[in-house]
Image (cartoon, coloured by chain):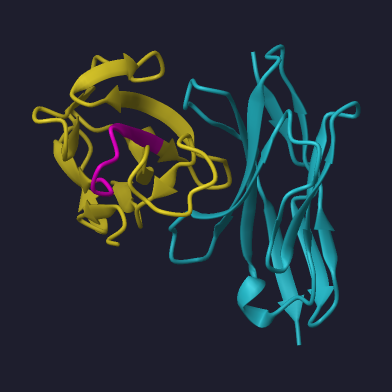
Chain colours: A yellow, B cyan
Amino acid sequence: EAGVAQSPRYKIIEKRQSVAFWCNPISGHATLYWYQQILGQGPKLLIQFQNNGVVDDSQLPKDRFSAERLKGVDSTLKIQPAKLEDSAVYLCASSGPGLAGGPTKETQYFGPGTRLLVL
Amino acid sequence: AQKITQTQPGMFVQEKEAVTLDCTYDTSDQSYGLFWYKQPSSGEMIFLIYQGSYDEQNATEGRYSLNFQKARKSANLVISASQLGDSAMYFCAMGPTGANNLFFGTGTRLTVIP
């Protein structure tokens, strides 16, 4: 079964530019997450979707970050305008039934991430 | 509020030896799950093992086992027979049952020495 797909893998932009990341979750997973992982830290949840609705976006800097999951499948995360401190790895994860052998429906499976560097 | 503490920023282990990575947590939830993930230099977070707070037996998955001590609020990961490919960052995480959101520790970098 295919895992979580993300693109692009790497992105370098100048500050104040905009950038978008794309994620396609594991087939059948209703819950999708975006995390930000700053160098030397653990991932921090930015936003969580259940199907196409937002469950938790309390940590999302809404003045510059936005995310959508219009059809309840793939999702995009946008930053506009980017700041230097947004340099990080952006990880997408999904959870739910559909991946045989998972110990719990809450187990999150992650994509390869997008490494963003803001200059 | 949930808090995960990993006190070992870096660990070294000889190939074929066992190693224990420490994790302590704090939560007011009665039912929760504990997870360990491996993050190689490629960046992907790889799920290793899960322990439910009401599970009486410690979880095992191949060479990975979770030493769960509920009263001490610890969930240490034990890797047996270390391999060179085990060199990576290891993250402990927890989340309330049914809520899906995970809280991660700061990670431990494991280096396996030939």
Using residue B48 as the reference point, say whether residue A24 is left or right of it: left
Foreground: B108 or A17? B108
In the image, the segment drawn in magenta is A25-35
Residue A30 among magenta residues: yes
Look at the picture and state if B24 lies above or below A21.
above
Please tell me which residue lies in front, A36 or A72: A72
Q: Position of residue A77 (x, y in %)?
A: 21, 34
- Up-down relation of residue B65 to residue A105 (above or below): below
**Residue B82 location (% of width, % of height):** 75, 75
- From the top left corner, tell me how far across and down residue A66 is, in percent: 20, 24
Residue at 29% in and 39% down: A29
Compared to A64, does B41 lie above or below? below
Which sits in the foreground, B45 or B64? B64
Reply above or below: B110 against B66.
below
Front in this rendered view, residue A73 or A80: A73
Query: Which quadrant of the structure image shows residue B70?
Result: top right
Q: Quadrant of the N terminus of chain A?
A: bottom left
Q: Position of residue B30 (x, y in %)?
A: 71, 15
Asked if residue B40 lies in the magenta stretch, the reply is no
Judged from this view, the residue extending furthest toward the left is: A71
Q: Quadrant of residue A88?
A: top left
Outermost residue toward the bottom in this view:
B114
Count of numbered marks: 0
